[in-house]
Amino acid sequence: MSVIVRDDGFHAEDYTGEAVLDISQDTQPDALPKSFAGIELIRVAFPAFNDGRGFTLGKLLRQNGYTGRLRAKGPVISDQYAMARRSGFDEVEIPDELAARQPAGEWVFRADWRDHDYRSQLRA
């Protein structure tokens, strides 16, 4: 099982559609889809917390025009949540074991990701 993480905490899976595209972390940028017609959810694999290739893929998907639901899937840790959101992900899907080690409060603490990047520090 897994837990969906959003800015307001933990959620159960609520996606009921069938139009899902799974993208592996080792997908080359030029192999990303050029059209997103009919795709409601894209899940980008994060096989380990120390593999950040998915952040780049998420950013590229958004730059290529994907406006649907974008999910990082795998053992992304709470410290990486702000990076996932800045890269264009709407949510993160983590394993139950990780959710038990890093409770919802740790994720919600990082949910103000827009206010805690280097640019906001420069504006202050």
Image (spheres, rainbow, N blue to C red):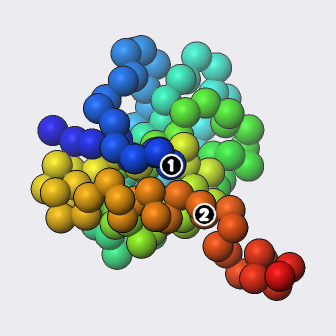
Residue 72 rendering spot, x and y as whole percentages:
43, 50
Tell me which residue sits at (46%, 19%) in the image: 19
- Residue 21 seen by the camera: yes
Residue type at mark 1 is Asp
Residue 102 rendering spot, x and y as whole percentages:
25, 64
Which quarter of the image is occupied by the C terminus? bottom right
CB under 8 Å between discs 1 and 2:
yes
The answer to whether residue 120 is above or below residue 87 is below
Tell me which residue sits at (68%, 62%) in the image: 114
Horizontal relation, residue 13 to residue 84: left or right:
left
Q: Which residue is mark 1?
A: 7
Q: Which residue is mark 2?
A: 113
Tell me which residue sits at (48%, 36%) in the image: 42
Q: Secondary structure at mark 1?
A: loop
> Is 24 or 96 nearer to us in this picture?
96
> Is 72 or 63 nearer to us in this picture?
72
Which quarter of the image is occupied by the N terminus? top left
Q: Which mark is residue 16?
A: none
Residue 36 rendering spot, x and y as whole percentages:
63, 27
The answer to whether residue 30 is above or below residue 43 is below
User: Between marks 1 and 2, how big is the CA–CA gap?
Assistant: 9 Å
Residue type at mark 2 is Trp
Horizontal relation, residue 117 to residue 41: left or right:
right
**Quick one: which residue is furthest to the right in this view?**
123
